[in-house]
Amino acid sequence: MKVQDLLQRNAILIELNDTDKSKVLSSMAHFLATLHGLPEGDVIAQKILERESDMSTGIGYGIAIPHARLTGIDRLYMVAARSKTGIEFDAIDEQPVHLIFMMVSPTSTSTEHTQILSSLSRIMSYEDIREKLLEAEDPEQFLDIIITGENKYVE
């Protein structure tokens, strides 16, 4: 499974205005639930926030990959967002987060869940990809950059 198979153009929020981590994660969780017709947006938000309170998903370089495993869903779902101003995320490098990739998956899909986390981390490890994503003019261009990066850097 690839990131480009999960992330859709209509699942990309090109400009977040809020800078509060909890509010951003909660609104992204509700966006994910609404977009994909999943019940219980509040439960998704709660699971994401619980996971985040255990350990920040800010992996450095301005990237965060909040994620949770849930019962009652049939596959992996993903949304992405960008914040030009940055969000204090308690990231490993103590820098603000500008790119957020939120993922939820069934409790039974640990291999796919881990594979997508790994692929995203690899794609985002390249500075040229991060810079292009920060400059993307619209969700379509944002997704095209992800696809190009994944095709180039992930085997």
Image (cartoon, rainbow, N blue to C red):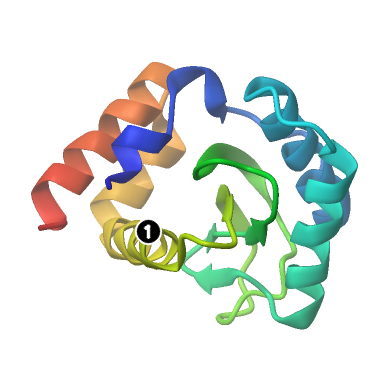
Q: Residue at x 83, y 45 (%)?
A: 26
Q: Position of residue 31 (x, y in %)?
A: 73, 29
Q: Position of residue 87 (x, y in %)?
A: 72, 55
- The image quadrant that residue 33 belongs to is top right
Q: In this image, 109 relative to 96: left or right? A: left
Which residue occupies the foreground of this view, 98 or 144?
A: 144
Q: Residue at x 79, y 34 (%)?
A: 30
| Residue under label 1 | 112
* Neighbourhood count class around disc 1 (C-alpha, 10 Å): few under 14, some 14–19, many 20 upward: some
Q: Position of residue 113 (x, y in %)?
A: 44, 61
Does residue 15 appear in the picture of this structure?
Answer: yes
Which residue occupies the foreground of this view, 98 or 27?
A: 27
> Which residue type does callout 1 highlight?
Glu
- The image quadrant that residue 82 belongs to is top right
Q: Position of residue 121 (x, y in %)?
A: 36, 64
Q: In this image, 2 relative to 13: left or right? A: left
Q: In this image, 90 relative to 21: left or right? A: left
Q: Is residue 50 above or below residue 54?
A: above
Dot 1 falls on a residue whose secondary structure is helix
Q: Is residue 85 above or below residue 97?
A: above
- The image quadrant that residue 39 belongs to is top right
Q: Residue at x 56, y 37 (%)?
A: 79
Does residue 19 appear in the picture of this structure?
Answer: no
Q: Residue at x 55, y 59 (%)?
A: 65
Q: Is residue 28 above or below residue 58?
A: above
